[in-house]
Amino acid sequence: MIPFNVPPCTGDELGYMQQAIASRKICGDGQFTKKCNAWMEERFRARKVLLTTSGSTALDMAALLCGLAAGDEVILPSYTFSSTANAFVLAGAKLVFVDVRPDTMNIDETKIEAAITDRTRVICAMHYAGVACEMDAIMDIARRHGLLVVEDAAQGVMSSYKGKALGTIGDFGCYSFHETKNYSMGEGGALVVNNEKYIEKAEILREKGTDRAKFFRGQVDKYTWVDFGDSYLPSELNAAYLWAQLLKADEINNDRLASWNEYNEAFRPLADKGLVQLPVIPAGCVHNAHMFYLKTRSLAERTELIRFLKERDILAVFHYVPLHSAPAGLKFGRFAGEDVYTTAESDKLLRLPLYYGLTAEDRQAVIQAVKAFYGC
């Protein structure tokens, strides 16, 4: 079986994990957590990065830092994972879903302004497949209406928009290092704080409501409980695992891009014949090959292609069921405007195997199987 995903592993992870054990500090905010934070701050020119236990908890922190109250509204795409929505529901907000663009499957920036009400507080932009939303337009809307922007960049580590790393453009950015992501620590994530006035609040929130971070910097002679917080610190063992991959970030990125580019070139003739649609990378966007997807001509065709590939030991999968049509989406939110593309386009989308270390032989097996399905 050619799997859809294989968690990334460089071979150096165990050595760094052993170093963490030998240091006799394996709880949060040890040497490897600090190394990972510093690496991302330097590489992505981020103001402040805080490693978290997951991409979901990074989103939870961002939502809490937005200071939402009951009845406040958050605008977000329906085509995203439940974690994007859960964070704002947990913070007490009402969800307002808007349609996606059919080319990138990202939130349609032209539909946002019509969804704004006097209760709107936040716009959440989720960068699907590591391809950037139209952030200039989104930031302009947010600033004109006095709104905060949260970037769900769970899939966007190493991607950029007009030279800026995804996650560093809005007030907050959220990364994921789940085993399905380009870089992994098993379960983990990071909060990027780009708005200076929220940095200290973020540190307190992450460290169980204490000013412990200030204590370790020598800014206070003892730390104490100063506000609401929780424990969002990952283990040093997880951070050590991630550190091995950050050190080879470009190697991993280039390997994934090679697979993505080979797929894209191989399936171009199918797209030219109108048999499939390929991913679109808008001008100004640099993507990270987080996934390669095809859009078939119908839901029935997608179902049949998945079955066809599985019979040939290739695991291909569809993606999100739009949140606005899910039971929780109906309970916690509403759709603003018309669902022109979200459901129709999501019904046709199929993701192919793509991971660090995918062999040329397996890539060709996938390519030939898809072509065979279409009689090419």
Image (cartoon, rainbow, N blue to C red):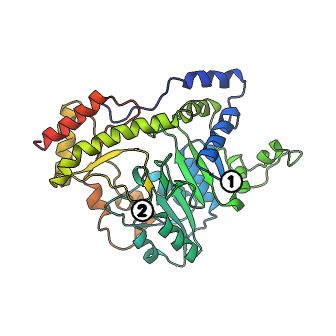
The residue drawn where x is 60% and y is 56% is 62
Q: Is 154 situated left or right of 53 in this image?
A: left
Please give the residue where the numbered disc 1 appears in the rendered image: 202
Residue at 50% across / 67% down in the picture? Answer: 136
User: Residue 12's x, y, as percent?
Assistant: 54, 24
Q: Residue at x 59, y 45 (%)?
A: 43
Q: Residues within 10 Å of mark 1 (few under 14, many from 20)?
A: many
- Type of the residue with mark 2: Pro
Which quadrant, please, contains the C terminus? top left
Image location (x, y in percent) of residue 18: 63, 21
Residue 189 location (% of width, % of height)? 56, 43
Q: Amino acid at mark 1?
A: Ala
What secondary structure is marked by label 1? helix
**Label 2 crowding class (10 Å Cα cut-off): few <14, some 14-19, many 20+?**
many
Between residue 252 and residue 326, name the one nearer to us.
Answer: 252
Indicate which disc residue 77 carries. 2
Q: Secondary structure at mark 2?
A: strand
Residue nearest the viewer, comparing 282 with 6: 282
